[in-house]
Amino acid sequence: MQMRYAIRLVIDYDYPGASDHVRNILRLMPGNGPDQQVLTSALTITPPPDERRDGIDFFGNATTAVAWHDPVATCRFDLTAEVERGVPAPLTDTSPSPAALAADLAALADIGPAAPHHFRAPSPRIPPDAAAVDFARAHLRETTLATVVALGEALHAEMRFDAGATDANTAPALAFANRHGVCQDFAQVMIGALRGIGIPAAYISGFLRTDPPPGQPRLQGVDAMHAWVRAWCGAAMGWVEYDPTNAKHPGDDYITVAVGRDYADVAPVLGAIRTAGGQDSRHAVDVVPLDTPAPPPGQQEGAT
């Protein structure tokens, strides 16, 4: 079964003082991949940048580099896309033991973008954390896949989701020590723990279709950008995805945008600005199945 989604993402930035130096690299456009096909996509930027260059980075993610030469006080990134997402095939565990995984890695000569070798070592935002590695060792199982699942379930049980506890720059070791955070923290803690026991792991950013509480209408703009994990489970199985925030393998309600070693490789908006004071940002996400009518702007699904 295939699910088709209409995706809308709007990110607004306001600067207290107009800046004459704004450069960004955007990773907002979903791409084609396993169980996923992009049917249409468009990224509109307001005000139009003086420079724009669309491309693909090393890991195969769509990028848009933009710059403004004249002062800007606000900017908006507006993504619309239509994506078809399939249900991943049921998993049959053919993975080796974590100890035997090293032999599979040693026999693999590939160094392309999807090669597990890129995802074995600590990365800029996921340095070694002895506490997380010890936690992972306590959840070793007979196979690599079983270890990935056991660790993800344990982190889900051990850590508390708290949207106000961390920000994009919080170190995974701190989030794990305090046992709380958001999806970025859950994913980066799990990635560091897996790497520490010899299992290559990658960071995935994307969209997640969310459901309102029973009996409640769906609010516009309340779906989310999300983060989860991709772990390499040996030559026979390859990459397997797991979401420790929700303790599950991603299904057809997950849409992949970018893959990298950590958040720095997949940040939706990454750049430099020269201005006085801080900045205010807002974002809204809608992931709407195409067989469900989308509500008019500013209204709720199910509202009368």
Image (cartoon, grey):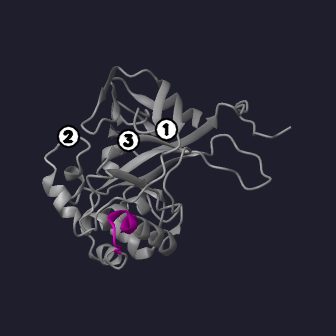
Label 3 Cα neighbours within 10 Å, binned few <14 / some 14-19 / many ≥20: many
Q: Position of residue 76 (x, y in %)?
A: 49, 31
The residue located at (51%, 59%) in the rendering is 248
Earlier sequence position, callout 1 versus callout 2: 1
Q: Position of residue 119 (x, y in %)?
A: 24, 53
Quadrant in which residue 148 is drawn: bottom left
Q: CA distance from mark 2 to mark 3?
A: 16 Å
Q: CA distance from mark 1 to mark 2?
A: 39 Å
What residue would you read off at disc 1? 14
Q: Does residue 281 show up magenta in the picture? A: no
Disc number for residue 258:
3
Label 1 Cα neighbours within 10 Å, binned few <14 / some 14-19 / many ≥20: some
Earlier sequence position, callout 2 versus callout 3: 2
Instruction: Tell me the SS state at disc 2.
Output: loop
What residue would you read off at disc 2? 112
For badge 2, the amino acid type reads Gly
Instruction: Tell me the SS state at disc 1.
Output: strand
Q: Is residue 115 left or right of residue 95?
A: left
**Is there a contact, CB below 8 Å, between mark 1 and mark 2?**
no
The quadrant of the image that shows the N terminus is top right
Q: Is residue 248 left or right of residue 51?
A: right
- Disc nearest the viewer among 1 and 2: 2
For badge 3, the amino acid type reads Ala
Disc number for residue 268:
none
Label 2 Cα neighbours within 10 Å, binned few <14 / some 14-19 / many ≥20: few
- Disc nearest the viewer among 1 and 3: 3
- Of residue 262 and residue 167, the one placed in the foreground of this image is 262
Specify start and end residues of the magenta stretch as a single range: 140-148
Does any portion of residue 175 appear in the rendered image? no
Q: Does residue 146 show up magenta in the picture? A: yes
- Of residue 77 and residue 112, the one placed in the foreground of this image is 112
Q: CA distance from mark 1 to mark 3?
A: 25 Å
